[in-house]
Structures are given as structure tokens and as C-alpha cells.
Amino acid sequence: MATADELKASDITPESVYRRRRELIGAGLASPLLALAGCSEAKVPAAPNAAKDSPDGFKTLDEKTRFEDVTSYNNFYEFGTGKADPAQNAHSLITDPWIIQVSGEAEVTGAYHLDKFLKGQTVQDRIYRLRCVEGWSMVIPWQGVPLADLLKRFKPTSKAKYVAFTSKADYRQMPGMAYNSIPWPYREGLRMDEAMHPLTLLATGLYGKPMPNQNGAPIRLVVPWKYGFKSIKSIVRIHFSETQPQTSWNMLQPDEYGFYSNVNPAVDHPRWSQASERRIAGTGSKLFADRIATLPFNGYAAQVASLYKGMDLRKWF
Amino acid sequence: MVLSRRLDWRWIGLKTLAHLLALLPAAGMLYRALNDRLGADPVAALTHQTGDWAIRLLLLSLAMTPLRKLLGQAWPIRFRRLIGLYAFFYASLHFCVYLFLDLGSGYWSQIGADILKRPFITVGFSAWLLLLPLAITSNQWMMRKLKKKWLTLHKLVYLIGVLAVLHYYWLVKSDIREPLMYGGILLALFGVRLAYWQRTRTATASGIRHGQKPT
């Protein structure tokens, strides 16, 4: 398999071609005879995204989302349920000092200052797709530390089957908490093997800048093959547990948001389709941008599908 | 003669103002769309804004009858059709944004499934579909032609109001405050109607009891 460096420009569908893919499909629809004859189908280029990632999935060549869009369109209900609310309100979040509590089934536990928590770790660059359960997606350059590297230091015991995360919840700093849109604090969790996967990142920055408050400063989870709400923001607690932890959206609506919540175009949200998405990327107007097909595991199937071998993904959605 | 012409001019001025006010949100959306100022997800922004204005104007049109009774003046009724038609205008824009900007021709095959399988789209589409005959029959000619049936037909607007609120309520993820607010306004408007209806009924009944001519 070719590595990222070996990918030749000619391996990649030229942007001018893949930008026109809908037009081409549209042309096929408009001329059913041609489509029947199979003439137009051959002209349709393959979905662009998965093919443009490095083999480890660490970096995609998909067009990135502008910094302004990444930092102005957020779901962070502690600062309000509107997409623009976090950017407007999150300035009140105090991120220094920041203490992370580590507890549960591990040999080393305790409370750590963020700098001590991250001590000795090398910050890495990742460019991941982020697919929101609402049907839009972004491509974000993150900086962070693989979660596995951090968790290993606490020597989780054999009883540690899951990792639970908790967001900061402070009514004085987070005005959106006045409305109970979610049972606070926000909670998320991963199975141990998901947490230890090399794609799973604890991000401390984006676009080379310290993590903006509205994006989950100072430290947040990024799990690129799961719907965005799994990537919990502003983490203050990490807990190793033997049983599957409670997660906020699942507590709120268990039939709509499963514990796994892997991106899956074949399993619709009960209220809307998950087969396609609006990609928020690039500098041009997104008003007339085409929808793109959503890929299984958000295009990271090659890296993570094996984690779910033998599982019925319709049942364990 | 001179007086009535002067009144006519005032009336034309008011109507023009109402048209301009009703078109203002659309003009704002167009301006922001052309200048890329609709935020990161402009399609979602347009969907939400057109939907918001459709439901607001629908409720406003429903408020005109109670307003006439509260004020004891006839003028609110003269704006009812105009407001109702703009509610239909924004509902149609809302539907068009979903069809042409959100789905786009590449995903039109999904529409049938969306309408059948997604309750919030089912009720939203039904609301728009039911608005269609009301918009078509909103002119004087149709009113005269349909006579009493016109009133019956236009009672559909109550159902449309309920469907529109339900459409909104069913699509939000967890923050139900806004759909509840619109639902509350709708209930209040129903309540006022019910109160007036009740009062008219008892007034009529007592009028009869006292041997007076029912009004």
C-alpha cells in the first residue's frame, strides 16, 4: 500500500472533475436513455474522500473547512443551543488553571493540572473529517495527542473495559446551562479498544492555534469515525470503568443516539436520512455546493471496521 | 368623494408598507446570500430563516380575526389575506430551499422516501400542500364563486397551523423552546377564538331567553 508521501498527484481525482460529479450524475438522470445504455455511468468519478487519505487515516487531502467556519459554527450546548452561540458566549470559560480528574479501574489515578497531564507528550498534526449527526460535515486540522499514549500512563487494569469522559459544567462560566437542553454535565464514553485506537485524539488546538473556547478548550476528544457529539469538549474527568458508561445524547433519546454512534449511511437517524451530508469546506459560497455521499465510518472503515467485526451495526448503532 | 379618495390613498400607502415589511426578511436573506454572510452552513441558515418567517406570518394572519374583535375595528381583516399569502410565499421558499439547495437534483430520488418516512417532513409537506388551495382561492372571484364553501375551505388554516408547529417541534434535537413558543401562541389564538365563540353563544342564548332578537 502506498504511503501518503507516495501518493502521486495523478492518483487523485482532479478537483475540477470531482467538483462536477453531481453535474455528471445529474446529466445521467436527465438523459435516462444514456443512463440505461450505461454510457453516462462510466463518466462519473468515484466518491473523492476516502481515496484521498493517508493510509493510516491521519491526514486527508479533502478540502479543509475555513478557520472562521470551524470556529463560528459549533454545537456546544453549555454556551447555548444556537450554532453561533458558543462563539459568542464561550469567552467566559476559564481554561487556566485546568484540572483533569482521572479515576476508576487504573493503577494510577488522581487530579492533574493540564500541563502535568500532557507532560512528555509530543503534539501531533491530524486532518480529520468531522461528521455531525445533523447531516453536515467539516474537515479540520487538529493538533493533539493520541488518547492511547495518555491513557497508558495511568495503567488501566484488566477490569477497564470502557473510558468515560465528562465535560466541565459550571453555571457561572457557561450561560447555556441555565436551560436544561441536556442533563448536565455532558458525558461521553468509548470502549477501551476505541479509546486506544491510533485515530482517537485528545486535541489541544486547531489550525496551529490553541483550542478556541467554542471548540472545546483546552482539551477535547476527536473520534473521526463517529458522529461529532461523541467528540466531547472541555474534558475535566476521565474514568476507567468495567461497565458501559452513560452518555448524554443516549440518556436523552436512546432510540436516536446509540452508545457507538459510528457514522453509518445505512442506518438513518429515526427522523432524518444519514446517507449524505452537506460538506462545509473551502472558501467559496456553500450555497450551491453539492451534497456528498456519507461514507461508512466517515471514510475510516479501512482503519476501524475491524473493531466491530461480528457486530450487527444496525443493532449497535 | 374627496374624503374617500384621501382615505384610499392612505389605504394604498398602508398596503404598500405591509408588502414592504413582509418582503423585508426575504430581501435580507437575498442580501446575505449574495454576500456570503449566511454563516458556515448557508443552506441550513436559509432553511431555518424561511421556515421561521412562514410560521410567524401564518400565526400573524391567524391573529387578525381576534385582533379585529379586541379592537372593535375592521382594518386587521383587510391585512389577513396579504399576510396569509406571504406565509405561503415563505413556506414555498422554505420548500424550494430544501428541494434545490439542500437536496439538489442529485438527491431528488430521496424526496419520496423523505415525505413518507420522516414524520417532520410529512407534516411540513402536508402543511404546504394544504396552503396551496388556500392561496389559489384567496382572490375575490374565487370567494364569490365558492360562497359558503370558501369559509369552510379556509378553516383549513387551523390545521395548517397545528401541522406547522408539529413540523418544527419534531425536527429539533433537544431545544424545544421555540417550537413550544409558537405552539403556545397558536393555542392562545385558538383560546381567544373559543372565548369569543362561547360569549357569542351565551349572549345569543340569553338574548333569546329575554325575548330579544338574537344578534
Image (spheres, coloured by chain):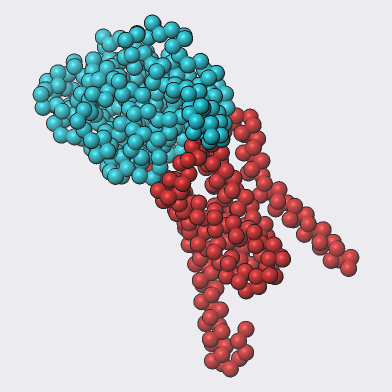
Chain colours: A cyan, B red
The C terminus of chain A sits in image quarter = top left
**Depth order, front residue of B88/A9:** A9
State whether residue B63 is above or below residue A186: below
Q: Residue at x 60, y 60 (%)?
A: B133
Quadrant housing residue A121: top left
Looking at the image, which residue sits at the far front?
Answer: A37
In-image side of B21 versus A29 (left or right) = right
Query: Which percent across, then down, holds residue A35?
Result: 50, 32
In-image side of A237 versus A32 (left or right) = left
Q: Is residue B73 visible?
A: no
Q: Residue at x 14, y 21 (%)?
A: A156
Looking at the image, which residue sits at the far left?
Answer: A158
Quadrant housing residue A162: top left
Query: Which percent across, then down, holds residue A94?
Result: 37, 26
In-image side of B141 versus A42 (left or right) = right
Quadrant housing residue A315: top left
